[in-house]
Amino acid sequence: MCAAARVRDYDATRDGPAAEYALETLRLVRQDHTVWNIVYEPTASRIRFLTVASSAVRSVDLQKLDFACGTPVKVLDMNAALSGDVTGRFDDYTTERNHALVTESYAETPALEGMPETIAEVIARYPESTVCQACGPACGAGVASMMPLLILSGRIMRRSWRQQARRA
């Protein structure tokens, strides 16, 4: 089955909710190296996803998250064995947690084998070098002032779709 054909042939009255249909389409076209499936619902301000590590569909309600400058950065392990609405399951970001995430990702990626620890450290500390676009350099750098960052997996970092961060 071709994803393009499913998109072309979608009929809401026959096929049901678009987000569920999209997830089913992604399941049908997944390949051996597919790690996760993500469906963005901009009009509902929701993200639905599943991973190879945890096939239960999870969702994040973006309207329940605070994307204001200066709010704590939140993280979620995309591979955690959770289901349903996981919006309330986000934890506060820490440099240590991000470093562990980067180190784990490097260990699981053959092409990065032998990468110096100093490179992992620079990558792990990158989020602290960003500042919220709305307040700019006047806010200063660091986790306390950077725009909320959602860490949804060991391999994905996604910033708010409403604001863009920039380097300090």
Image (cartoon, rainbow, N blue to C red):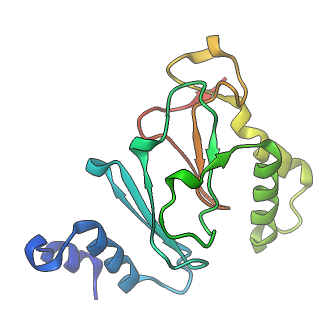
Q: Is 144 rendered above or below residue 50?
A: above
Residue sitting nearer the eye, 167 or 45 = 45
Q: Position of residue 93 (x, y in %)?
A: 70, 43
Q: Give x and y (percent) for residue 145.
A: 65, 24
Quadrant for the C terminus, please: top right
Relative horizontal placement of residue 26, taking residue 12 as reference (left or right): right
Q: Is residue 45 above or below residue 128?
A: below
Q: What residue do we see at 78% from left, 51% from top?
A: 97
Q: Quadrant of the N terminus?
A: bottom left
74 sits to left or right of 40? right
Name the residue: 51% across, 59% down: 86
Q: How many marks?
A: 0
Q: Where is residue 71 shown, x and y percent of the image?
A: 59, 29
Closest to the observer, 24 or 81: 81
Farthest top residue in view: 138
Give the image quarter of residue 163: top left
Give the x, y percent position of residue 75. 63, 49
- Please report the residue visible at 77 percent of the width from the left and 56 percent of the height from the top: 102
